[in-house]
Amino acid sequence: MAIKSLLNLTVVLLILKSQVLGALAAAGDNEQLFLDLCHVLALAKRPIPEISGVLEAGGFYKQIQKLNSSLSSLEWRKQFAKTGDSKARPAYKSGNGKEDEVRKQRWQNWTGAEDELEEEQPKGKTLKEAGAEVPDTRTRLLWLAQLQPTAEKAATVMQAIEHKQHSASELSKDKIRKLITDAAYGASAGNVDEIKQANIESESGGATTRSALCGSDTGGAKAGTVAAYLFCLCAGHSGDSSGTVAVCVKDQTPHNQANSADLTGLDTTIKGLASKCYTDATEDPLTPSELRQAVTTFRAKLKVHTGGGKAYYGKYTDTGCSGANAQGICVMYKTDSAGNAAAAKNIPWVQNLLSAADKLEKQQAASQTLETLTAELKALKSEAYNIGQQVKLSQEIHKLTEPTEDEKPKGQKKQEQQAKLQCETINKATECRQKQPTCE
């Protein structure tokens, strides 16, 4: 009988012991949440891609414009000549008060081509690349005429590229990075080392106590960053082992502050906890799915208190989750109204990550479109620089099929002889080409 009573007492003591341990913030209680938050911090350090194809496309288009200018008449090119003491190229002006939108849009490209040709070394490099180093007037005009459809197509493609680039201005890697660092550290910090207590407080609805920051039975949490969540879910409490309980990770930085006290030491505690996070070894560019998966994984750990009206991340006991003795540690949200319940899902750092994921996805789509357009522009550039070969081939065929001198009508011979005599009387070849396009 005595032995049986002793056994029963032992069982009771074990039950009581387990209940007390379960009621306290114990080592490892929020370790899984800590790892989830560390994963987000690791994602915040990953490379973010930039929209591709824009610079390369601009280079192809410039090559086409340079060839177009090189083959154009001196008279046409004079309108882009530098003037005045500043030696600046003239800006676009509407003719007779009428706005020519096409001319206005392309003016900058034309003047840009002239700038590049002016600096080109060696001179005539563009024409040489196109196989037209010193074309005679007739050949030049043939090349220019055949180039125009290709140049028009290129202008349309380049306009589409510029439009897509402009519409995708919000999808730059810097703006996406800002969303992610805002989620991780707050708007005032670009990394964990820049976190400051005052900034956490101001960016968390003016919370100046742990209960206001992390939530309580009387008010929902105001913590809006991963850094603030690290503090709320992991920082110790002066009422429980002087804040030394390793709720999240072994040897974590102690935080010996009471629940209702100020947040002194918050930034030091956050930095200490972040230093315990693992390092993501991969240097692969960040993807939308990784951000969304991180959010889904964390959100799945939201719990609802059996008493109703409360939702929380972490550990909650019958008496609360302030981190004090006999309580757990959590981020608490009130669910007694639709607005309060929405706050548990619409956490600021979560929304920032989802927004970043959406922008990354749109960026990928924009990059694919730009890459396709760039490939099209590259093909047009090759087409433009091969026109010379087509013209030469056409001229060779023409020579083989045109009549000989003996076969030409007398009238045609006479006209050609007169044109030749007229050209010989003009001293400058340039004047000859301008006045008589038939001169060679």
Image (cartoon, rainbow, N blue to C red):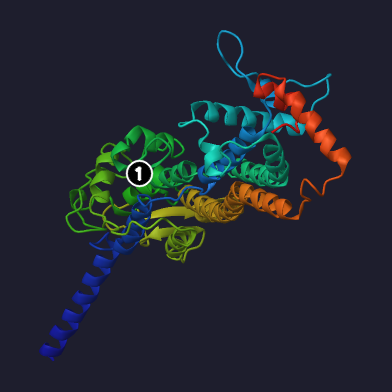
Give the camera-side residue of 78 and 348.
78
Give the camera-side residue of 168 and 343.
168
How many tags in the picture? 1
Give the camera-side residue of 75 and 375.
75
The quarter of the displayed image where residue 181 is located = top left
Q: Can residue 58 be seen from the camera position used here? A: yes
Q: Is 52 positioned to the left or the right of 74 in the image?
A: left
The secondary structure type at the circle numbered 1 is helix
Whether 378 is drawn above or below 301: the answer is: above
Quadrant including the C terminus: top right
Q: Is 31 positioned to the left or the right of 104 in the image?
A: left
> At which x and y percent is residue 279?
27, 56
Whether 203 is drawn above or below 272: the answer is: above
Q: Badge 1, how many Cα within 10 Å: few under 14, some, many 20+? A: many
> At which x and y percent is residue 195?
32, 38
Quadrant including the N terminus: bottom left
Q: Is 436 positioned to the left or the right of 294 in the image?
A: right
Task: Tell me what residue is drawn at x 65 percent, y 18 percent.
Answer: 90
Whether 13 is drawn above or below 310: the answer is: below
> At which x and y percent is residue 99?
80, 26
Residue marked by disc 1: 210
Q: Can residue 92 be seen from the camera position used here? A: no
Amino acid type, callout 1: Arg
> At which x and y percent is residue 199?
38, 34
Q: Residue furthest left?
A: 2
Q: Is 379 positioned to the left or the right of 24 in the image?
A: right
Q: Residue furthest bottom?
A: 1
Give the camera-side residue of 270 and 164.
164
